[in-house]
Image (spheres, grey):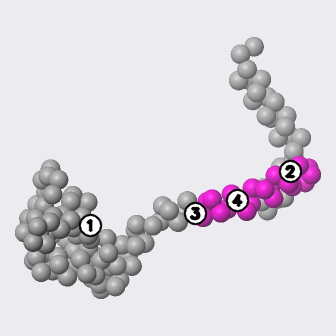
């Protein structure tokens, strides 16, 4: 981050004033950001007093960095946070989809004995693979 912010104490909940000091923004800015960023949902207790958790303080610092240091707009920062939050899920979904669509065709091709070059990026001889697997099994067996 561009500016040096104080370390976050080991507490469970932080008031809006504490978060404002920890993140270098005014309390009214935090209230505004709650409207703009759905990820910010502090707990509200008596009299609508806000209590932020540690992960929300980190999120506010990330938002502050995107807006103030990196020059994002509100909508740009919102989009960036969504991109940062979902890549692992998206990669897992892409991997699962790839396995669901490609694996059965690979298995069918190998069962017929004509494994496609395009499927794995190189040619495989099913008999050579079978021999190698038997060699590996022999190495791993306790005999």
Quick one: quadrant of the N terminus?
bottom left
The first of marks 1 and 2 along the sequence is 1
C-alpha span from label 1 to label 3: 25 Å
C-alpha span from label 2 to label 3: 25 Å
Query: In this image, 131 relative to 77: left or right?
Result: right
Tell me which residue sits at (76%, 27%) in the image: 137
Give the residues drawn in magenta, as a range.
93-115
Q: Which residue lies under the disc numbered 3?
A: 93
Label 4: which secondary element: helix
Q: Which residue lies under the disc numbered 4?
A: 100
The first of marks 1 and 3 along the sequence is 1
Q: Which residue lies under the disc numbered 1?
A: 59
Label 1: which secondary element: helix
Q: Quadrant of residue 95?
A: bottom right
Label 2: which secondary element: helix
Query: In this image, 83 relative to 119: left or right?
Result: left
Tell me which residue sits at (89%, 49%) in the image: 111
The first of marks 2 and 3 along the sequence is 3
Camera-nearest residue between 117 and 141: 141
Q: Between tags 2 and 3, which lies in front? A: 3
* Rendering coords of residue 75 (x, y %): 34, 85
Q: Main secondary structure of the magenta part?
A: helix
């Amino acid at each position: 981050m561009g500016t040096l912010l104080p370390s976050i104490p080991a507490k469970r909940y932080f008031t809006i004033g504490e978060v404002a000091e920890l993140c270098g923004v005014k309390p009214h800015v935090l209230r505004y950001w709650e409207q703009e960023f759905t990820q910010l949902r502090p707990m509200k207790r008596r009299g609508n007093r806000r209590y932020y958790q540690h992960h929300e303080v980190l999120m506010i610092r990330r938002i502050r960095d995107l807006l103030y240091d990196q020059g994002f707009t509100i909508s740009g920062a919102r989009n960036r946070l969504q991109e940062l939050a979902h890549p692992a899920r998206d990669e897992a979904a892409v991997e699962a989809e790839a396995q669901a669509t490609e694996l059965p065709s690979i298995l069918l091709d190998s069962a017929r004995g004509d494994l496609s070059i395009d499927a794995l990026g190189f040619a495989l001889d099913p008999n050579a693979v079978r021999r190698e697997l038997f060699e590996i099994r022999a190495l791993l067996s306790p005999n």
